[in-house]
């Protein structure tokens, strides 16, 4: 457990970055510090591993006052991930990942062997091991940063805005990767972000920091959305609190509706195509959705119109592990207003209706 006991940090010149902070980070949980720029969230995180020293107060890790622990020893026992990964450019990926185990005295050969296993755990191809950071994409570099932090199997992981410089698509993938890793490893993670949606998606508990480093609320995501502690928190979360609340509810209980579907090959040769009334989903030979087509599109396609000109976009898809927000988005972004639910291989398993999502919301409210 990590605890802050009336911790403050005042920089030279009188600027207060963190003001009288008291909170406890539970073992095995992912806690997010969120706030706007200058709210003290990163300073609070860096005081845990003594990258920044507090002006007053006590920070404890496993009941030990960190000020009494050698800072080098402290940091070797805590994983640390920063923005832009912070990889050493002159070292290969495998040696970047093996850095901390080697510093802790593990033979380099053994550390490299273990590093390959960590690369696989974070979803990276072992072929990247001999490349240099400059040869990797931003998302790959960030995954390497996570792998390096995990290489020595630390119980605590500090992540300081690790995904803020990544494009939205890759950022979404990395967020899902962190959730997957946490479900397997159960680390004690403190994650800093300025993005409230990222905080709500990842966190077991969220600490909202305000101006001057004052803690405004420390709560579970559902409580933040339904019962913001004050006007500052309500404004920080912003409009759409109800829609964000949908992100916290699992979509696994939604009924899956039958979808009329047709194979792309059946459209091409005119055989085996059902009579189409309204929208029909076009799938490939493996059952992966290609797009929606209406009755007029079917007729035009059989008259020689290329399939690409006949079908409408699929819209977003509901994938395994999705939430009600994603289910509603899948339904509303579809031209048929039926969201497509797919399995882990991307094959269609059924349809999702917006009405079913709203019914699930009502049931959740009653519970």
Image (tube, helix red, strand yellow):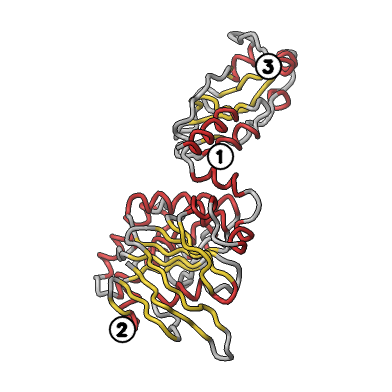
Provide the residue designation for mark 1: 326
Compared to residue 293, the image places residue 106 above or below, namely: below
Spot occupied by residue 96 in the image (x, y as percentages of width and height): 40, 68
- Marks 3 and 1, how far apart at CA: 24 Å
Image quadrant where residue 326 sits: top right
| Helix, strand or loop under label 2 | loop
Mark 2 vs mark 1: give the one in front: 1
Q: Residue at x 37, y 80 (%)?
A: 58
Residue at horizontal 61%, vertical 64%? 232
Please state which of residues 176 and 138 is positioned toward the viewer in this rendering: 176
Q: Position of residue 180 (x, y in %)?
A: 40, 49
Q: Nearer the viewer, residue 356 or 352?
A: 356
- Residue pointed to by mark 2: 70
Pointer 1: residues within 10 angstroms few (<14), some, or many (20+)? many
Q: Nearer the viewer, residue 152 or 221?
A: 221
Q: Residue at horizontal 63%, vertical 34%?
A: 315
Q: Which residue is mark 3?
A: 278
Q: Quadrant of the N terminus?
A: bottom left
Q: Is residue 288 above or below residue 320?
A: above
The CA span between labels 2 and 1 is: 46 Å
């Amino acid at each position: 457990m990590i605890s802050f006991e009336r911790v403050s940090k005042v920089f030279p010149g009188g600027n207060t970055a963190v003001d009288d902070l008291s909170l406890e980070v539970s073992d095995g949980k992912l806690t997010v510090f969120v706030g706007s720029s200058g709210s003290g969230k990163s300073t609070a995180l860096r005081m845990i591993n003594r990258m920044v020293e507090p002006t007053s107060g006590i920070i404890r890790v496993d009941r030990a006052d960190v000020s009494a622990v050698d800072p080098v020893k402290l940091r070797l026992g805590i994983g640390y991930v920063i923005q832009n990964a912070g990889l050493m450019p002159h070292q290969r990926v495998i040696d970047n990942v093996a850095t901390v185990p080697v510093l802790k005295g593990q033979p380099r050969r053994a550390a490299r062997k273990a590093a390959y296993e960590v690369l696989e755990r974070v979803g990276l191809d072992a072929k990247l091991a001999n490349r240099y950071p400059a040869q990797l994409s931003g998302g790959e570099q960030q995954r390497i940063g996570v792998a390096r932090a995990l290489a020595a199997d630390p119980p605590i992981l500090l992540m300081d805005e690790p995904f803020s410089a990544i494009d939205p698509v890759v950022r979404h993938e990395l967020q899902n990767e962190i959730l997957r890793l946490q479900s397997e490893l159960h680390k004690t993670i403190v994650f800093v972000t300025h993005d409230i949606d990222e905080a709500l998606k990842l966190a077991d508990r969220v600490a909202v920091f305000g101006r001057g480093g004052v803690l405004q609320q420390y709560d579970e995501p559902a409580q933040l959305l339904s019962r913001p502690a004050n006007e500052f928190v309500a404004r920080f979360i912003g409009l759409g609190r109800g829609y964000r609340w949908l992100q916290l509810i699992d979509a696994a209980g939604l009924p899956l509706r039958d979808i009329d579907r047709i194979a792309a090959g059946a459209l091409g040769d005119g055989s085996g195509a059902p009579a189409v009334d309204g929208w029909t989903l076009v799938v490939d030979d493996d059952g992966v959705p290609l797009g929606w087509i209406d009755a007029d599109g079917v007729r035009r396609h059989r008259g020689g119109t290329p399939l690409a000109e006949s079908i409408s976009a699929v819209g977003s898809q509901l994938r395994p592990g999705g939430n009600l927000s994603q289910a509603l988005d899948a339904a509303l972004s579809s031209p048929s207003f039926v969201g497509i639910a797919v399995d882990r291989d991307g094959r269609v398993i059924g349809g999702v209706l917006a009405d079913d999502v709203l019914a699930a919301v009502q049931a959740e409210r009653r519970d």
